Image (cartoon, rainbow, N blue to C red):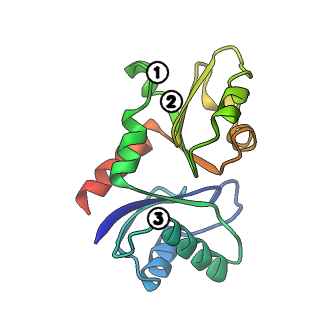
Amino acid sequence: MKTYIALLRGINVGGHKKVPMAELRELLSKSGLEHLKTYIQSGNIVFQSAIDDSRVLEETIKASILHHFGFEVPVLVRTRDQLLKIFNDCPFQQEKKTNSYFAILSDIPNQDLVKEAYKKTYENEEYAILNDGLYFYCANGYGNAKFNLNFFEKKLNVNATSRNFKTMVKLLDMSLEN
């Protein structure tokens, strides 16, 4: 059995795409995932599976949610080592790192698209794109940022979901317990 972390995008935000975590754990356990744990209501799931393919697990989770809840949800699945690498590769100094957002990208973006994305800048906002991770720091707070995840998804032609520093640390800790 291998430990995985699933990151769902866009659930339980502003009353849309409501997915109760207890119901989600029960649903996913019926689809063969084991030792399920969730963290907060924004779609963070730590689990174990004998399936050794993240893409298959993503599709299994997406299909289960669509069938049960009636709507599609983007899902990214990573192993603990993969998520730890994204976390550790953050190029920001510790103070900025603890106030950064970590976007997990569905794929490593084309380098020409990355170069194109870097042409866009805003004052007091910094980002770095390394492999399948995007690191975003905003001096004025995420809620006041001009950049958003949709910009990066379109520019890089990838799907993405982001988590703050605290959530990344918690998920990494939870995945050790499994």
The local secondary structure at tag 3 comes to helix
Q: Residues within 10 Å of mark 1 (few under 14, many from 20)?
A: some
What is the CA distance from the residue labelled 1 to the residue labelled 3? Answer: 30 Å
Q: Give how far across and how far down residue 105 sits, in percent.
A: 57, 47
Q: Are marks 1 and 3 in contact (CB under 8 Å)?
A: no
Q: Amino acid at mark 1?
A: Lys
Q: Eyeballing the image, is 31 above or below 74? A: below
Rendered-image quadrant of the C terminus: bottom left
Q: Give how far across and how far down residue 132 sits, in percent.
A: 52, 43
What is the CA distance from the residue labelled 2 to the residue labelled 1? Answer: 6 Å
The residue that appears at 69% across and 32% down in the rendered structure is 112
Q: Quadrant of residue 139?
A: top right
The residue that appears at 74% across and 38% down in the rendered structure is 155
**Which residue was labeled with disc 2?**
100
Q: Amino acid at mark 3?
A: Ser
Q: Eyeballing the image, is 143 above or below 2? A: above
Q: Are marks 2 and 1 in contact (CB under 8 Å)?
A: yes
Q: Amino acid at mark 2?
A: Ser
Q: Give how far across and how far down residue 134 sits, in percent.
A: 55, 36
Q: Residue furthest left?
A: 177
Nearer to us of marks 1 and 3 is: 3
Describe residue 149's horizontal placement relative to residue 78 as left or right. Answer: right
Describe residue 47's horizontal placement relative to residue 1 as left or right. Answer: right
Q: Give how far across and how far down residue 153 sits, in percent.
A: 70, 44
| Closest to the observer, 124 or 55 | 55
What is the CA distance from the residue labelled 2 to the residue labelled 3? Answer: 26 Å
**Which residue was labeled with disc 1?**
96
Nearer to us of marks 2 and 3 is: 3
Q: Eyeballing the image, is 80 above or below 53? A: above
**Which residue was labeled with disc 3?**
54
